[in-house]
Amino acid sequence: MDTLLYILVLVGTFSIMEGLTWCTHKFVMHGFLWYLHKDHHQVEPGFFEKNDLFAFIFAIPSFLLIYFGTYDHIWWMQAIGFGIMFYGFAYFIVHDVIIHQRFKWFTKSNNTYVRAIRWAHKMHHKHFGKEDGESFGFLYVHRKYMDKVRRDKKLMAGSKKVEYAPEAE
């Protein structure tokens, strides 16, 4: 098995997961499994949410692909499983740590991408029901959110540069 091909399958799987995540979020989580996702939009007390069950649901195919790919020596199956697993890890870091700050690890980022992904997610969460949602993606940030953050950063930078200069007498 060629290592480069393995890495390409893994990275390709990771990339494809963004589209699958968008579809799953829009049509499954905001569809027939809304009862599991609802508490993520309508926050209730406690650390855990029913929505957290999706991590286990999505881990099952990853685990099975890694297990059977390893056991049966089917490299591409294992690579797909690891691609799904790495996407899940990235999802955890970006969604639970950076966006919702369920763990206080990266709380003060001024990075344009991080601020745009937070803004896009905020726009997603402004809808309390399963209808009329927007921004269902995860890693991809729509241009309108990036542009908004860039405009805000320019305004902030401009306001910091304006200093009071007393008139000469």
Image: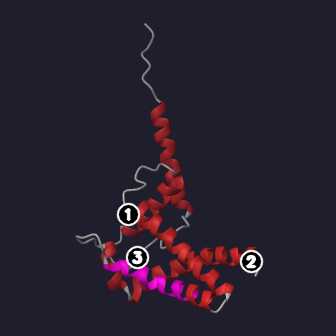
Going by the image, does 55 lie left or right of 22?
left
Q: Which residue is mark 1?
A: 100
Q: CA distance from mark 2 to mark 1?
A: 36 Å
Mark 1: few/some/many CA within 10 Å (<14, 14-19, 20+) = some
Mark 3: few/some/many CA within 10 Å (<14, 14-19, 20+) = few
Q: CA distance from mark 3 to mark 2?
A: 41 Å
Going by the image, does 6 lie left or right of 90?
right
- Tell me if residue 138 can be seen: no
Q: Position of residue 82 (x, y in %)?
A: 58, 78
Q: How many marks?
A: 3
The answer to whether mark 1 and mark 3 are in CB contact below 8 A is: no
Residue furthest toward the top?
A: 169
Q: Quadrant of residue 17?
A: bottom right
SS category of the residue bearing label 3? loop
Position above or below: 109 against 49 = above
Q: How is the image coloured?
A: secondary structure
Q: CA distance from mark 1 to mark 3?
A: 21 Å
Q: Which residue is mark 2?
A: 5
Q: Position of residue 79 (x, y in %)?
A: 64, 80
Residue at 24% of width from left, 70% of height from top?
Answer: 46
Residue 96 on the magenta span: no
Q: Which residue is mark 3?
A: 132
